[in-house]
Amino acid sequence: MGSREGTQKEISKSKSKNVFSEIMASSGTTDALINLRKTIVSTRNLALRFEAAVQNPPPATLLNIPPNPPNPLALLADGARILKAQTTKLSLLVLNRPFTPSEITYILKELCKGCLPAMMSAAELCPAAKYTNFMHRLVRASVGSTMKVLVKLFEEIPQDEHGVQDNQGRDTLQYTGQLWESCDFMINLADQGLRSLAAAKVTEYRSLVDDALGELEGWTTDEVDDGDDSSSTIFLPLPQVDDTMKALSKNVLKKLKLVGLLYPPLLKRRIKRFPEINGSTSPEQLPSSKQVADLDTLMAYTQLFQEETDNIAETLYTSNMEEEVKVRLGIIIDYAKKALAVVRKDWDGGDDEFTAWSDKWLIRINEP
């Protein structure tokens, strides 16, 4: 009897220990989930606040930039590398089992005190007056879009002990992939530098201008389909085009081709020879305020060339309004002359091959 009673007591003690352990484990899980929920909210709010800040930046005069700030592109790239690694871990923890809320909480807290503030600082340390408006906008846009996707990723984190179910997880993978792309882009800002990025953008404008000129040239040829399929391109004449509009269309095409000719030398002699700004550029190596302003002006004009060429093509084809076409043509020629005036000399203020070429171009554009 004594032996049986002793055994029952041992069994009872063992059950009590198991129940206690289960209660403690349950309590620990509950605490971890509560902590996770709080951390998700705070991290999400931080990302939302940063997204709003880059979309509505304060005036440059109100920014408190230190005397010797770090390179913002390098800082942004470092933050992007960390973010890419941390969000990779985060997505794996979210998608895989067992669900570990404490580890997810740790990563979120690391984001809040590490790479997210660093990326926001990079956006603030990249003023347009020093790094060009072109680079300034790229940095802010990339940080803002990254914060926006992060908010969506945070909303996919499970907040109970069950984790992600079998039919879930696609959005998590999608947002993680988007973040990888954003991080790679921010890293490339530092690696490729301003000249490469600006040249790529101007080349994009040039391609659009070439497309519009190709359409205009097709409209002015008056070629129609004669049943011969030897040519893969069929051009139709402008609707209801009289001789006056035909002559105007040909003159417009001639002038716009001259404007299009500006792109290659501007790319070669000005955009690609601008003082480089990348992740290794020190404050002493930054271009002067005049150089920055002139490049931004040039970039704006190359975009306007493309937009006005499209406007002229659309006006010719849809309305045949002679006076409007003439006005728009005058506007784009004026833009071209102003652009040349800004960058007629090289970035150091001297004459070069482009200086002489631009003088000849001005003579040709002024011809009837």
Image (cartoon, helix red, strand yellow):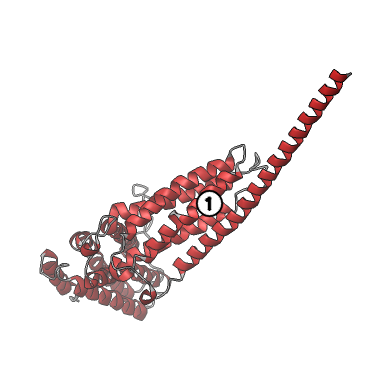
Q: As drawn, which residue projects farthest toward the right?
A: 1
Which corner quadrant of the image does residue 367 belong to? Answer: bottom left
Q: At x 76% / y 36%, what residue is drawn? A: 19
Figure label count: 1
- Left or right? Give the position of 155 relative to 229: right
Report whether residue 305 is seen: no
**Label 1 belongs to which residue?**
108
Residue 205 point in image, percent of width and height: 32, 62
Q: Report the quarter where the C terminus lies.
A: bottom left
In this rendering, does residue 38 appear at all? yes
- Residues packed near mark 1 inside 10 Å, few (<14), some (14 to 19) or many (20 plus): many
Considering the numbered disc 1 on the image, is that residue within a helix, a strand or a loop? helix
User: Which quadrant, please, contains the N terminus?
Assistant: top right
- x and y percent of residue 319 in the render? 42, 74
Residue 21 in percent (x, y) is at 71, 36
Given residues 340 and 314, the one toward you in this image is 340
Looking at this view, is 368 or 338 the one in front?
338
From this view, report whether residue 205 is shown above or below residue 155: below
State the image quarter where residue 11 is shown: top right
User: Residue 80 versus residue 36: which sits nearer the camera?
Assistant: 36
Q: Check the image and name the residue furthest to the front.
A: 2
Left or right: residue 194 versus residue 80 is left
Q: Relative to the observer, which residue lies in front, 319 or 192?
A: 192
Q: Position of residue 271 (x, y in %)?
A: 23, 62
Q: Is residue 10 above or below residue 246?
A: above
Instruction: Judge from the rendering whether residue 279 lies leftward or rightward of residue 27; answer left or right.
Output: left
Q: Is residue 221 left or right of residue 49?
A: left
The amino acid on which the numbered mark 1 sits, given as a three-letter code, is Leu
